[in-house]
Amino acid sequence: MAKHSTSCACYDQPMTSSGNSTVTPGQATLTDALTSIAGGFLVVVTGAGISLASGIPTFRGNDPDAVWKKDITELGTNRYFMQDPVASWQWYTERFDMVLDKQPNAAHRALADLERWQTGRGGEFVLITQNVDPLHERAGSQRLVKVHGSADRVRCSRAGCINGAPRGSLPRTDFPMNAFRDNPSLPTLPRCPACNAPMRQHVLWFDEFYDEHESYQWSRVLDAAQRMEALLFVGTSFSVGVTALFLEAGLARHCPVLSIDPGAGEAPVAGIVQIKEAAEDLLPSLVKALQDS
């Protein structure tokens, strides 16, 4: 495996023109990195920044509506749900109604195309998203790990129930919410059809662990970190355990490690190529160049 430089690079200005299109340093660097691994294993890790162009506020970062500016580390816990399931459901219903109404943007669609390009040439690919929105799957991504769960599913709060951890969940649409929205209360709370326990969000809360539910596919995440040959971050702030895991593993394996984030600050460690461009602009151009090469 070819080693990459341990220095940091940052690209945010146009470099050359090819035909009628401008090739930025970031696009050129990405093209070189992705073509160099041939039939190798490409891992993409996405964060909330990729969905900002779809109208979904970020969790961290400079977005003034960033969700984690609103005490989510307290609201997003099993402890809070057990203390006040009605308030927990109210908070998530308000947010997830908005999330589930959104559609993929060009960056989501380009990553689905990147998956097809990589697998079409005999390579391995996995997209690991920290997002709970359904935009990657709506865009057509197949080799997808939703490591923090999914807003379009719920599960029983009683562990061991067929609809609860470690395997069960149900579509959110199975539970009509009009009665709860009109009168948020314990009697109108969504209930498990198997055991009548309160349903909960099918998301990883801050006081829970990645291996608590099989759908988080934690073993697949660990396998990807151990075998990847190129690593691309898109729209992540490097503030969550998954990004730290992959960043450490990528640098230890001497993989090309690249990050697309127009609002990126200083790189958290040396060895990351930071590309300060909007993913919804850069990724479609990148994929077209790869497909045409």
Image (cartoon, grey):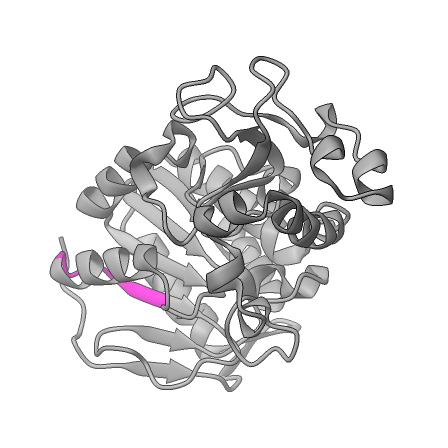
Residue 152, image x, y percentages: 64, 37
At a point 40% along the width and 36% down the height, the residue shown is: 216
Q: Residue at x 22, y 74 (%)?
A: 271
Residue 129 visible (yes or no): no
Query: Is-magenta flag for residue 109?
Result: no
* Rendering quarter of residue 185: top right
Residue drawn at 66 percent across, 56 percent down: 106
Task: Answer with the quarter of the image where residue 40 lies.
Answer: top left
Magenta stretch in the rendered image: 253-258
- Residue 249 visible at all: yes
In-front residue for pair 219/2: 219
Q: Is residue 139 left or right of residue 293?
A: right
Number of numbered labels in the structure image: 0
Residue 257: say if magenta.
yes
Q: Give percent across and percent down for residue 190.
A: 68, 30
Residue closer to the observer: 1 or 10: 10
Q: Nearer the viewer, residue 46 or 100?
A: 100
Q: Residue at x 23, y 50 (%)?
A: 229
